[in-house]
Amino acid sequence: MDNPADFVKPPVGEQTGIIKAWISAFRLRTLPLALASIGMGSFLAAADHGLKLSVVAWCMLTTLLLQILSNLANDYGDTKHGADSIHRQGPKRAVQAGLITARQMKKAMVVFTLLSLLSGLLLLWTAFGREGLYLFLLFLGLGLAAIWAAINYTAGARPYGYIGLGDISVFLFFGLLGVSGTYFLQTQQLNYKILLPAASLGFFATAVLNINNIRDIQSDQLAGKYSLPVRLGPVKARLYHFALLTAGILCAFVYTFLTYHSPWQYLFLLALPLLGFNGWQVWRIRQSHRLDPYLKQMALTTLLFVLTFGIGLLL
């Protein structure tokens, strides 16, 4: 039975606190990085004269809803499984801090699951209309897989993030599938070369996750969350970070070499010093709580890479 207190309107000050708690749970700072794959795919589509702004808009909305769903599920799941504890080095989560109840968070997850599904259906209708039924069904399957991945990263009965598969998921959904899917929804054509910049973005997005997981090694170990840095250890996890950054740059170089038509295509090299700085700081700093600024810096550098890469293509 519902608690009657749930239906009592809280005081204004408490309402403000609740709103702030939900905004915090949405983790707005993660949303720009989630849009990076839409940006990269759209730049590639524009370079091939296939840009469709209506499709881009629906892609952006669907991606934002999925990212918020993932953040809410992460907040709920890590508290449920013990990864969000007093030992965690990062910011406190809403359920962990008692600002939002587990029950309220589960309801919000249902709401954002339905919103993501509705937005995704409208996206596919805009992209394919009545003519592309098979493509509609194919992308619907991919969309359902994205919803499943967003929820089950930490909130499922057997969360795959707890066995070290989070990196693969980020590489696929932020990189290969996110970029190539955005490109195909606009152009409705295949271009296997775009998998290279898609992989670049996937590697850089995975690097953001890797910094997060290096920071949380201690609390994740105590909670039985075997992320890749927990499995590798602090030193090898930092070497893995260098490997991700190097692979991302190499993929961008190879794509530019294969499609070269202007020196402007090397504009993405403006991001190279920032990537090197990030790799060096992650290697140098051994106190976990001091890594948080470089998590943000890596996310912003990834956005700079997408912008410079895309502008270079168009110029």
Image (cartoon, helix red, strand yellow):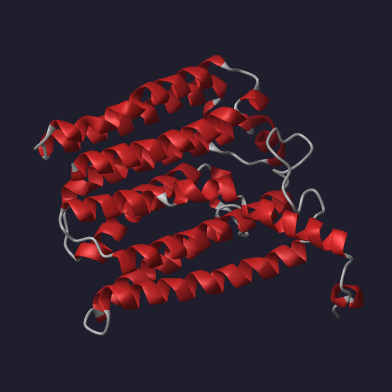
Query: How many discs appear?
Result: 0
Residue furthest out toward the bottom: 130
State the residue in front, 144 or 193.
193
Q: Residue at x 34, y 25 (%)?
A: 272
Residue 234 is at least partly visible in this image:
yes
Split into 4 quadrants, where in the image is the C terminus? top left
Residue 165 is at least partly visible in this image:
no
Left or right of 15: which side holds 228? Answer: left
Split into 4 quadrants, where in the image is the N terminus? bottom right
Q: Residue at x 27, y 39 (%)?
A: 309
Vertical comparison of 176 with 284: above or below: below
Pinpoint residue 306: horizontal percent, then vertical percent.
Answer: 34, 41
State the residue in front, 126 or 225.
126
Please tell me in which quadrant of the rendered image residue 16 appears: bottom right
Please tell me in which quadrant of the rendered image residue 277 appears: top left
Left or right of 206: which side holds 44? Answer: left
Q: Residue at x 55, y 44 (%)?
A: 163
Pinpoint residue 256: horizontal percent, then vertical percent.
Answer: 17, 35
Please tell me in which quadrant of the rendered image residue 129 appears: bottom left
Pinpoint residue 2: horizontal percent, then vertical percent.
Answer: 85, 78
Residue furthest out toward the left: 261
Pinpoint residue 55: horizontal percent, then vertical percent.
Answer: 32, 67
State the residue in front, 154 or 131.
131
Vertical comparison of 36 with 2: above or below: above
Vertical comparison of 313 with 290: above or below: below
Q: Residue at x 20, y 42 (%)?
A: 313
Vertical comparison of 211 with 52: above or below: above
